Amino acid sequence: MRHFLIWTKQYCQKTVDNFFISQLFYKYYFNKGEVKFVDYLKLLPIPILYAFGMLKLEYISKVLSDKYIGLSESEIYSKTQKWFDDFGHKFIRDKMIDEIEYHRNKNAEIVLISASPRNICYPVFSHLNMDELISTDLIIENNVFKGIQGNSVYKEEKVNRAEKFLKENNMTFEDSYFYSDSISDLPLLEKVGNPVCVNPDKKLAKIAINKQWKILEV
């Protein structure tokens, strides 16, 4: 049996940076008047600082999530679902849906694996009727949101979580497909038997060409 691993932002028609999904989310609520202009401005340099190694993913996740600490679990998921229903779904790529259906017809396990928080991933996971969601977990205590787990599903941790899923389901990396556009996903791309690079960034594109990996331009 084959299974299919795909990273959250592969669904976007534009891939600007690792935090494009989060920026779309905050832009939506900025336009709704729930995010202050000064707070939205603070997000703009994050992708550049991250690209130059000046910020860690865990720190960025904390900055993005702190605003919602104290809300109930249902409120956290309701906010991301409303964003997706009103705005986020417009960015889903038809080509990626076709890829999912191709694998589904092959009796694949369709898995969304992402460093993004679970509440951000869940609307996409649900909308596309996927089988499993592997993402950075939320800290929920007494039904109250307390923040994001410190160990993000990122780089080697993404490999670890994927391996755990495979073992639990009697599957192997060799029969797996993984779709990504970022050099940060290189550890998992190198593990699977069928790596696919979707609109890859410059570093990943160079590696993909050298390794003769499949490249999709969508």
Image: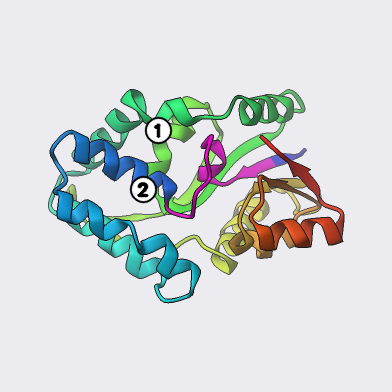
Asked if the residue under mark 2 is in contact with the one under mark 1, i.e. CB atoms within 8 Å, the reply is: no
Label 1 residue SS: helix
Image height check: is 160 above or below 1? below
Task: Specify start and end residues of the magenta stretch as a single range.
Answer: 4-19
Which residue is found at the position 78% from the left and 56% from the top?
A: 208
Residue on which the image places disc 1: 123
Crowdedness near tag 1: few (<14), some (14–19) or many (≥20) residues, C-alpha within 10 Å:
many
* Horizontal and vertical percent position of residue 78: 24, 33
Residue 22: give its label.
2
Q: Is residue 145 visible?
A: no
Seen in the picture, residue 83 relative to 34 is either above or below; the reply is above
Foreground of the two, 170 or 118: 118
Residue drawn at point x = 46 percent, y = 33 percent: 124
**Is residue 13 covered in magenta?**
yes
Considering the image in quadrants, where does the N terminus appear?
A: top right
Residue 100 at x, y percent in the picture: 65, 30
